[in-house]
Structure formats: structure tokens, C-alpha cells
Amino acid sequence: MYIIRICQKYFFISLFFVSSIVFADQSSITKDKIQNFYNAVVSIDSIVPDEARTSKSLGTVRQGSGVIIDQNNILTIGYIVIEASEIIIGLPDGKKIPGKLTGYDHSSGFGIVSPIIKTSLTPLKIGDSNKIELDDNLLILPSPNKGVGSVVKLVSRRPFIGWWEYLLENPIYTLPMNDSWAGSPLINHKGEILGIGSLFVADAALPGTLSPGNMFVPINLLRPILKDLIKYGRPKSGMKPYLGISTNDSNGEIIVTRVSKDGPSDKAGIRKNDIIKSVNGKQVNNIENFYRTIWNSGKIGVKIQLEIIRDKKKLNFKVKSVDRMDYFMKNKSY
């Protein structure tokens, strides 16, 4: 009953929130502007082989949206297209054309997709994700083939920590929720791209507070790596050591929930349900501290010493880190 009351409370708050947006100043976002913005939004459908590293966790059929950023390239969220053997781009005029994965960055989550055949593309400008005010009307624009666009507000900026060796320092959290977030651009009234849709989150407004919304990867993370992604398929610097391990933290303990098959941790002997106590002799008690300690240990290839508890016994392992891109199945575009 208590949970129902909380849900009812936030349902009415959401109704009030949406209404306030509808009756806000409409001069900044017009129907004609939105139609022009949609000319740069595409759908993306991918097929991933069964043997791909990410097939079990992300599935073999993936779909979402993307936004055109120049005459040759489309920006999306990388999990839609990583390890894909087939990518189909749905253009605004209804045509469907084959695409390829041009670049991927695990640290941000961005993926760059490009048409295989020569195609006329209409891009949107890349904006400044540091210049978003709480009162700004923002647009989430999935491809019409994938979902319905919506007007949202920024509600918070705070770190996001993912169990898949992923940490974003300053992502964008928005309300109300849009169901078709994957790869959808977050756009301001000028038509500038501010972020790319990554996740649904239950507590967008405040950690632990029921406020269903979305998390967007800030576009400013793309600026320093865009040229490398297009030219080399990955960033040439700043890549983090990868261990191939999924974790959860509970009551001050870091518990291994999954070990990636044939990854560095698997080869070293780490197992599911191991409890990680220290990294290179430094005590760790939450996932954020765990990640930062690993990433501050050196460049890709550095050996990480993990002290773990298994069956109430202390064990030590040395895990040789790798470049995550080398662990993934290579795309035909590479």
C-alpha cells in the first residue's frame, strides 16, 4: 500500500510536470522546427552473431535511433551496433540502406555508423552539453519508426556507474521518461545535439527517489574523440584497462556477478560470487572505487593484482588487462 501511494504521488507530479511544459513558452520549439530536426534522425536495426561477446547480455537483434552529425556519419549509442554483422539505417524519407560501424568508444558509449552506399544526409549541429539550464525545454527525438518524441527537462547531473566496467562523470538525466531512448538524440530549441539516449533510470531526479526518466551521454564527450573514431574506429588515447568482469556492491562488499568468457579475469581464474577485497593492495568497498583504482593503475596491458575471498579463504590473482576493443568480435568495417 505504501508503494502504491508513492507511485500515485509521482504519477500526479508527472502530470503536473508535463502540463507545465505544454503551457510553457512555445515560441522556442515550433512544429516546423521539430520537422526540420527529424530530417536528421534515423532508425538503426542491427543483427549480431550468436558467437559475439555481447550476444547473451545485449541480444542478437538490436534496434534504436541515431542522429546525423555530418555528410557521412551518424551518431548513436554503441550497444545497438557493437559486434553487429548487419546494420540497416532507416532514413527520414523511408528508405532503408545498409550501414557499417565506423567507430566505437566504450568509455562514453558512443557509436558511429556510416552508410555503405553514397547517400545525401542532412546533419544537425553538435551543441554544448555544459550549457543546459533546468528551465530549458529539450526534445528527445527517436526515429518515428521506433517511437514518439517528447519534451523533457534536465533534472540532474551526477555520475553514473554501470556494472559492465562503465562510469560516466556527468551524464544528463531527464524527465519525464521516453520509452524509445536508445540512440535517440537530446536536442535543444536551436536543433543542437546535447546528448545521446543510453538508459532508462528509475531515479532520474535524485538517487533512491522514484522518478522514472532517462540518462543521456553528454555530447561534449564526443568532441575530443570524434576524429579518431572516424579515422581509426576507436580513440587513440585515454583507453582504460579492461578486466572482463561484472560486479555489484552490497554492504561494503564488491561481489563478482559475471566473468566474461575468455576475458582477462576468466583467464586469471576469477569466478562468479568471488568477493573482491583489494586492488593492487588498496582496499575497495564500492564499484566506483574499484573502477577508479583499476584505471589509475596504468595503461592497457598493466597487470592488476586482485585479492578476493572465495569460500571464506583469501586468494590473490594477477589479471592482465586488455583493450576492450580487442576483446570484441571485429566488425567488417575494421
Image (cartoon, grey):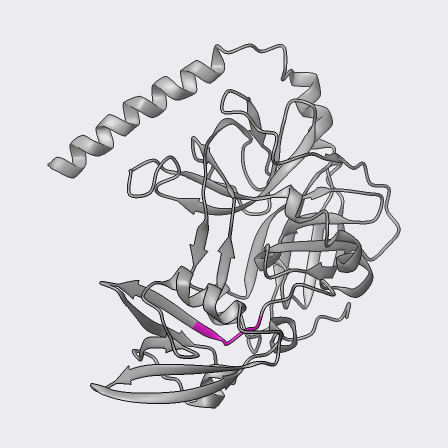
Q: Is residue 284 above or below residue 98?
A: below
Q: Position of residue 42 (x, y in %)?
A: 69, 42
Query: Residue 181: where, in percent of width, then height?
Result: 52, 42
> Seen from this angle, which residue lies furthest right?
118
Q: Image height check: is 246 above or below 229?
A: below
Q: Nearer the viewer, residue 151 or 324?
A: 324
**Quarter of the figure with the C terminus:** bottom right
Asked if 218 appears above or below 55 in the picture, the reply is above
Q: Which image quarter: residue 92?
A: top right
Q: Is 34 or 197 nearer to us in this picture?
A: 197
Q: Quadrant of the N terminus?
A: top left
- Residue pictured at 74% horizontal, 32% vertical: 39
Q: Is residue 243 magenta?
A: yes
Estimate the x, y position of residue 159 in percent, counting from the top left: 46, 48
Point 63% across, 17% down: residue = 29
Q: Quadrant of residue 28?
A: top right
Which stretch appears magenta?
241-245
Residue lying farthest to the left in this orientation: 1
Q: Name the foreground residue: 63 vs 139.
A: 139
Compared with residue 256, is residue 213 higher up or lower down, i.e. above or below? above
Residue 206 falls within the magenta-colored stretch? no
Q: Is residue 133 left or right of residue 46?
A: left
Main secondary structure of the magenta stretch: loop
Residue at the image position 81 percent from the left and 36 percent from the top: 122
Q: How many marks?
A: 0
Residue 239 in the image: state x and y as whole percent.
64, 66
Tell me the residue at 82%/61% (across/down).
Answer: 231
